[in-house]
Image (tube, rainbow, N blue to C red):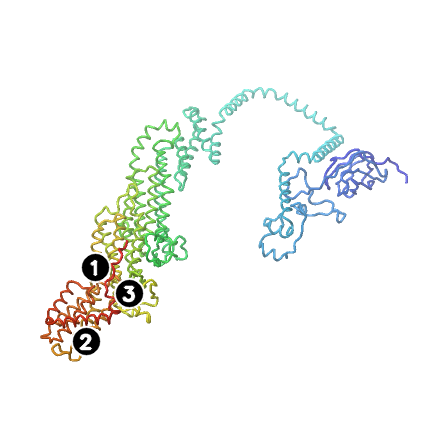
Amino acid sequence: MSRSRQPPLVTGISPNEGIPWTKVTIRGEHLGTGPADLIGLTICGHNCLLTAEWMSASKIVCRVGQAKNDKGDIIVTTKSGGKGTSTVSFKLLKPEKIGILDQSAVWVDEMNYYDMRTDRNKGIPPLSLRPANPLGIEIEKGKFPQKDLEMLFPGMSADFTSENFSAAWYLIENHSNTSFEQLKMAITHLKRQANKKSEGSLAYVKGGLSTFFEAQDALSAIHQKLEADGTEKVEGSMTQKLENVLNRASNTADTLFQEVLGRKDKADSTRNALNVLQRFKFLFNLPLNIERNIQKGDYDVVINDYEKAKSLFGKTEVQVFKKYYAEVETRIEALRELLLEKLLETPSTLHDQKRYIRYLSDLHAPGDPAWQCIGAQHRWILQLMHGCREGCVRDLKGPPGLHSTSLDLDAEVRASAPSHLGQTASLKRGSSFQPGRDDAWRCKTPHRVAFVEKLTKLVLSQLPNFWKLWISYVNGSLFSETAEKSGHIERSKNVRQRQNDFKKMIQEVMQCLVKLVRGALLPLGAAEGSGRQLGGWEGKAELSGPWLAHVIQTLRLTYESLAALEIPNDLLQTIQDLVLDLRVRCVLVTLQHTAEDIKRLAEKEDWVVDSEGLTSLPCRFERCVVLSLQSLRGVLECKPGEASVFQHPKTQEEVCQLSINIMQVFIYCLEQLSTKPDADVDTAHLSVDVSSPDLFGSIHEDFSLTSEQRLLIVLSNCCYLERHTFLNIAEHFEKHNFQGIEKITQVSMASLKDLDQRLFESYIELKADPIVGSLEPGIYAGYFDWRDCLPPTGVRNYLKEALVNIIAVHAEVFTVSKDLVPRVLSRVVEAVSEELSRLMQCVSSFSRNGALQARLEICTLRDTVAAHLTLESRSSFKQALEALPQLSSGADRKLLEELLSRVKSGMHLQLACFQAAPPPAVKT
C-alpha cells in the first residue's frame, strides 16, 4: 500500500507527566487528515485510541491509560502516513485517586472515563472514585458474619463515606488480622495524606498547568471564530465596525458639547457635595457601623466612635449633621437599654457586670446602673436561697425513690459520725462493746443536713462576688478614668447614701440564711410569723448530735469564708448567734440521746463476770458517756469570736440536769436488772472467767442465775461505779469544761448509794432471815430443855447448819466479788448474834450442863466468825454470854476448851473460809 503523506511526528505533549487517565494534548506534524485517518495511539506502550479526539493535523487530545512502563514515547499511527515517531516522552506517575471529599486543582471527570476491565467507556457514580484502601496497608478480610457485625454496631456502617461510619466495624471487617506495627504505619500514612491537603493552593496550581493551557487554547479558538464571523458580514470586520461606532459617538459628542458646558457648574457643585460626603463619611456611616458593631459585641468600638462623633458634631448647627447625629443618639440609647438589660440579667459573672457598668458609665447612662446591678444581684441571691429551700422540701415530700442526696429512713434515723465511734483508746475494759446503731446509716446524709450544705455553698458562691461588686462601687474601679473624673463628687455622695442601704442588704441575706437554717434545724425556735414561710420540715425526727456537729462545722467554715472577705463582724453576728444556738442544741441533744442509749444498755447485759466480780456493763456505760463527750469536743471548743456554750445559767442548768439524768438512768438500769424476774434473765450465753476459781459452781449444771446472784453482781458493779466509773466520768466532764460537776457527782453518788443500800438490804434479808429463823427451832428441836440436858459432847446440829448456811453465803459472795465478803458476812453475823443473844436472854434458867452446852455453842460461833465481827455483833455475843451462869469449876473450863478444840478440828475444812485473808491490793 502506497502512502500519500509522511509518517506522523510527535514534537510535543502537554503535560509531559501525570497519573493514569490524565488528559494530555499531543502536538506534532502529519497527525492525520481526520478522525477516521487516526488508527493507532500509544503512550508508554498503552493503547489510548479509545480516548483520543482528533483536533487537527497538528493536535490530538486523549487520556493516558494504565501503562506498565513509567516512561515512554508517544506513537501515532495513521492510514495515510503509517506508524510515526516521537521526539518527546511522557512520564507516568503513580496513580493517586482523588476522593469525593479531596481538593483538586482540576475538574475530575466523574461520570465518564475509560474502564480497563470492560475495554469501553462506562459511566460510574462519583462514589466509585473513593480510595479503595484509605489506610495504605494490605486489606485482610475477616471471617466475621455480616449479621453479627450489624448486631454489634446497630445503625452504623463500615463505609467511610457514610455519616454513620464506624471505625471499629471497618477495622474488624478489613484488618482483623493486621499487626499493631502495621496499624502504626497506617496512622503515618493517614497523617501524610492529611499533610498533602494542607500544602496550599500552589501545589494544585502546579499540578493543573495543563488546565490553564486548555483555557488559553479555548480563548484563542473563540477569538479566531469571532474574526471568522466578522469577515463574512457585509459591514466588514469587527474592528471596522467598532471604528464606525466610535466615529458616530464622536460626532454626537460634538453636537452636545454646548450642553455639557452648561452642566459644568452643576457637576462642580455635585462634586463638592461628594467631597463633603467623602470628608464626613465617618458620621454618615456611623449609624450603620454602630449596628454592626453591636451585633458583633464590639461595644468598645461603638463607645469610641460615639465619643468622637459627640466631640465633633455634638453642638453642630448643620441640619444634615444634626439629622445623622440624632440617628446616632437613637442607636446609642438603644445600646444603653441593651447593656442595662444585660447588666440586670441573672446569673451573671462579676467580670461581665463590671464590663457592662463601665460601658454604661462611658455612655453616660441616666441613673445609677451600678447600684441597680447591686440591687438585682441582692434580689437574685434571696431568690436562690428560697428556691433552694423549696426544692429540698419538695424533694423531701416527693417519692422516696427520687432522692439522691439523702434517704428518709425511719424518719431520718440517727447516725453516728464515723470519727466518733473508733475512739476507745482511753478505755481498757469491755472490748466487746458494739455500737447500737447500724454502720450502714453513716453514709446517708439527712435531707436537712444536705439542705444546709447546699444553702451555704450557694451563699459562698454568690455573696463574695456581691461583696466585691460593692467594694468596686465604693472605690470607683467600676468606672473608666474619664467617668471617674467627671462623676467623682456625685458618686461620693451616692456611696454615703447607699452605704446604709447596702448594709441592710447584707443583713437581709444573713438573716435569710439564719432563718432558713433555723427553720430546718430548730423548727420549734422559729417565730410563728415566719414558721409557715420557712417550714416544711415538720414530721421529721430531730437530728442526732454528730449531724448537728457536722452542720456546726459547715456554718463555721461559712463564717470564716465570709469573714475573709473583710465583711464587718456586726453583719455576721447573726451567724455567730445561730452557731451558738446550734452548739447548745447539739450538747443537749447529744446528752439526751446518750441517756436513751444508756437506757438500752440493760438489754446488752451478758452477766459475764470477770475475776474482779464485774460485768461489762460499767465499762459500756463509761465508754458510752466518754464517746458522747468526745463527739462534743469540737462543738464545745470556742473558735475566735465565739462565746462559751455554758455562758447562760439556763444552759448550765439544763446540761447539769441532763448529765445527772444520764447517771440516774444507768442507776435505774441497774435496779431493773437486779429486780428482773428469774424467767426474764437470758443466760444462754453465760460464761465464766477462767481466771476466777469455780465461779457459780452451783449453776454450772443448769446455767441459771438466781435473784440473789443477780443482786450480788449488781452490788459489785455499784461498788465499782462508786470507786472508779463515776469519778472518771466527772473528770471527763471537767475536761470538757462542764459546769456544776460537784452537783452532778453528789446527786449521782447519792442515788447510787441509795440503790446500793437498798440492794444490800434486800440481799441480807434474803440470806440472813432464813439462817436467823432456823436458830430457835433448831435449838429446841427434840424438846430440848436447858434445865435438863445431858453433858455436852460437841455442838448441836442447828449450829452446824447455821455455820454451813453462813459458809454458803460466803461462797456465793466470794464467787462474785471478794470485796463484798466482809460487808455481807458482817451483817449476817450481826443478825445471827443478835438473834442468839435474844434467845439466850429469854431462857429463865440453865442447868450446869445446859450452861456449858450454851457457852460451847456461843463461843464456837463467835470464834468461827471472829474475822467478821463488828461492834454490834461483839456486843450481842457478850450479852448472850452474860445471860449464862458462870463456870463454877476448872474442870468445866477445861472441858469447854477441849470441846471447842474438838469442834474446830472436826470442821477445820468448812471453817477455813472464815480465816482472815490478807487485805486486797490497792487498785491503781
Image position of 153 with respect to 890: above or below = above
Q: Could you tell me the amino acid type at mark 2?
A: Thr
Q: Position of residue 753 (x, y in %)?
A: 21, 59
**What crowding class fits label 1: few (fewer than 14 Cα within 10 Å), some (14-19), or many (20 or more)?**
some
Q: Earlier in the sequence, mark 3 or mark 1?
A: 1
Q: CA distance from mark 2 to mark 1?
A: 47 Å
Image position of 278 with respect to 732: above or below = above
Q: Which mark is residue 793?
A: 2
Q: Does 905 sit left or right of 375 as displayed?
A: left
Q: CA distance from mark 3 to mark 1?
A: 23 Å
Image position of 609 with respect to 781: above or below = above
Q: Earlier in the sequence, mark 2 or mark 1?
A: 1
Q: Which mark is residue 815?
A: 3
- Asked which quadrant contains residue 759, the reply is bottom left
Q: Which mark is residue 753?
A: 1
Q: Nearer the viewer, mark 2 or mark 1?
A: 2
Looking at the rendered structure, the secondary structure element under dot 1 is helix
Camera sees residue 387? no
Q: Does 113 sit left or right of 911 as displayed?
A: right
Residue that lies at the very extreme toward the left in this rendered image: 844
Q: CA distance from mark 2 to mark 3?
A: 35 Å
Q: Position of residue 921 (x, y in %)?
A: 27, 56
Camera-side residue of 693 and 637 = 693
Looking at the rendered structure, the secondary structure element under dot 2 is loop
Q: Does 131 sit left or right of 906 as displayed?
A: right
Q: Earlier in the sequence, mark 2 or mark 3?
A: 2
Looking at the rendered structure, the secondary structure element under dot 3 is helix
Q: Position of residue 26 (x, y in %)?
A: 77, 36
- Asked which quadrant contains residue 562, the reply is top left
Q: Position of residue 73 (x, y in %)?
A: 80, 37
